Image (cartoon, rainbow, N blue to C red):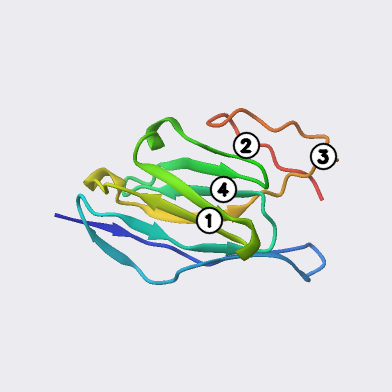
Amino acid sequence: SCVLLLPLLIVFFTDRGMLCDKVTQSSLDRMVASGSEVVLLCTYSDPDLFWYRIRPDYSFQFVFYGDKSRSQGAYFTQGRFSVKHLLTQKAFHLVISPVRTEDSATYYCAMSTMRQNSSCQVPEFGAQWCLQQR
């Protein structure tokens, strides 16, 4: 059986309309055989990044977070999901191996809008999201 993975391009703009930060993903849909390995490519301009996915039932799931010094995945990622965070190449690639049918989803690479000076506290992974007011 095959698994369909749908990477997308996400660009963030400031409220002044200027390009602020950028994340670029490989743009092709991927059909991957169960049991194989897939690498979803992501490059960025700011290293505080997330991978998340939307499953066929439209449920949203956090997958991985990474910054300059660490990365942390959701509970279901242990053992089969990892990230290749290449700081010099500004890359944060998601690796799934071996791929399973339940991995079918649209995968997104996105930047954090959280900043150190935010009055908003960073929640635990899987908790509600808190966005900085601009």
Q: Name the residue under label 1.
A: 109
Question: What amino acid is at disc 2?
Answer: Trp
Say which quarter of the image contains residue 106: bottom left
* Label drawn at residue 50: 4
The mark that comes first in sequence, 3 or 2, is: 3
Residue position marked by numbered label 2 in the rendering: 129
Image spot of residue 114 (x, y percent): 73, 44
- Residue 33 in the figure: left or right of residue 65: left
Sequence-earlier tag: 2 or 1: 1
Q: Spatial distance from mark 3 to mark 4, Cα to Cα?
A: 18 Å
Q: Position of residue 110 (x, y in %)?
A: 58, 55
Amino acid under disc 1: Cys
Mark 3 secondary-structure assignment: loop
How far apart are the two marked residues, 4 and 2, measured between alpha carbons?
A: 12 Å
Residue at the image position 77 percent from the left and 34 percent from the top: 120
Which residue is rendered at x = 77% and y = 63% of the image?
Answer: 14
- In the image, residue 70 sits, relative to residue 13, either above or below, namely above
- Left or right: where 79 falls relative to 10: left
Q: What residue type is labelled 4?
A: Phe
Question: Label 4 crowding class (10 Å Cα cut-off): few <14, some 14-19, many 20+?
Answer: many
Q: Distance between the residues labelled 1 and 3?
A: 22 Å
The label nearer to you, 1 versus 3, is 1
- Nearest-to-viewer mark from 2 and 1: 1
Given contact means CB atoms under 8 Å apart, are the residues at marks 3 and 4 in contact? no
Nearer to me, 24 or 134: 24
Q: Distance between the residues labelled 1 and 4?
A: 6 Å
The residue located at (63%, 57%) in the rendering is 87
